[in-house]
Image (cartoon, grey):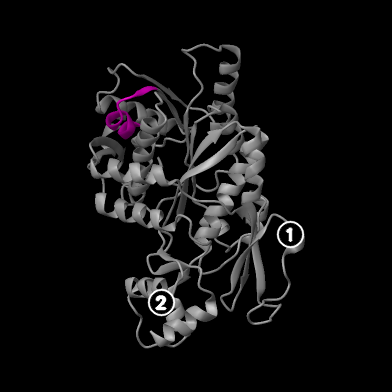
Amino acid sequence: MENNNLIIIKEGSTKFYIHERDLDSIPSKSMSIFYNKKMIINRDISNLAIQVYSKLYKQDLVMVDSMAASGISSIRLLKECNNIRKIYINDINPMAVELIKKNIKLNNLDKKSFQIEVSRKDANYLFSEIAQKNYILKNEYNQKPNVISIDPFGTPNLYINSAFNAIQREKGLMCITATDTAVLHGVRPKACLRKYMSKSLKSDYCKEIGARILIFFASRIANVNKIGIKPLLTFSSGHFIRIFLLTYKSKANISKDFKKYGYIIHCKCGYRTINDNNILKIPKICPTCHSSDKFDFAGPLWLGELHDEMFLKELIIQNNNSDYQNKRINKVLNFALDELNMPISYYNIHKLCQNLKLQNVPKIDVILNSIKQKGFVASRTHFDPLAIKTNMDIDSIKQFLKTL
């Protein structure tokens, strides 16, 4: 790797090398070393989440960045978080590993007290190696990782099982990204069945369906490894979904979580509801428009909460004390707070008004206040800035928009 092919760019407080030809490239597997500058918000929120996790659960961090590419996420974390004891920075691409070492040296991290282990391995091999080493050499110096990040180009499904086998079983943090949103959002439903053992559905609220399918899949794989999960934060933006899951090992609570698996029932007329984890109970005819050919479903998927309230509030505090994209991140986090305890799915107001052929689209804040005055619950959602969540039924919403 010739230095004259590299340029230095800056992200947060960190400088790092990337290939000059990769700077403005469309993200793809053909890149020399994968880098997507549009994913800065993903890295910002991930770093905030890991720091808040360490604070809330009093953890000295042993972390695995299993698909590090240029190493920017790990290097930023090393500079921004004070209590990292050890970090594995791994990528299977030999050019990426060479670049990671250059970036560590560029940021003077090779002389720090924490332990950095750079490797060129398949992620599953690395997870299995860590798990086996911990099994053989159980001591305070060989602690299981309490943070594992899986951030592939495409589906993470190939790596989740071995990652759960490697992670700390109680109060570990699993960070998983999926970029195969065409699969999870219902464009390729057969691929979703194959990859995630769940039926996706193309709809106005497909981003939430995709996130819930991903959490369900991760939860079931965790259960196979005698682990339960609790979503701390679910974040969907552009063409990726990122979930942050806290692990626990109580078998009784794992069994209780089975009630959080189920299905979303959907009709093209706008009707939607949820059903428990029994596919035989899914109705065949829409109770609103009495149609059967427009009736469909998605699942099994996660029906529980997508976020944890205490975790979100601490994230907002942490963000306000950081140098990140404060306003954009705070907007996402506050919308996520609004989503807590709200019904599953959401309604895009602009599309509803378009379908109703209304000339004017009311402001969302006006709509929310008016719905609440009628005795219903309503909120914004981070999945779609033009959408609302509410327990008002679809026919009432349409009539309400016409009168408003």
**Could you tell me which quadrant the N terminus lies in?**
top left
Q: Is residue 313 above or below residue 402?
A: above
Question: Which element type, helix, strand or loop, lies under badge 2?
Answer: helix
Q: Is residue 2 above or below residue 143?
A: below
Q: Does residue 358 appear to the left or right of 255 in the view shown?
A: left
Q: What amino acid is labelled 2 in the image?
A: His
On the image, numbered disc 1 is attached to which residue?
279
Report the span colored magenta.
74-85
Q: Position of residue 370 (x, y in %)?
A: 37, 76
Q: Is residue 36 above or below residue 75?
A: below
Label 2 packing within 10 angstroms: few (<14), some (14-19), many (20+): some
Q: CA distance from mark 2 to mark 1?
A: 33 Å
Numbered badge on residue 350:
2
In reply to whether residue 298 is colored magenta, the answer given is no
Residue at screen point 44% across, 88% down: 357
Residue 159 in view (yes/no): no
Residue 27 in view (yes/no): yes
Q: What is the residue that sits farthest to the right in this orientation?
A: 280
**Could you tell me which quadrant the C terminus lies in?**
bottom left
Label 1 packing within 10 angstroms: few (<14), some (14-19), many (20+): few
Q: What amino acid is labelled 1 in the image?
A: Ile
Number of callouts? 2
Q: Does residue 297 appear to the left or right of 6 in the view shown?
A: right
Question: Which element type, helix, strand or loop, lies under badge 1?
Answer: helix
Instruction: Using the rendered view, name the quadrant where residue 57 is placed.
Output: top left
Q: Position of residue 259 (x, y in %)?
A: 65, 49
Q: Position of residue 303 (x, y in %)?
A: 58, 54
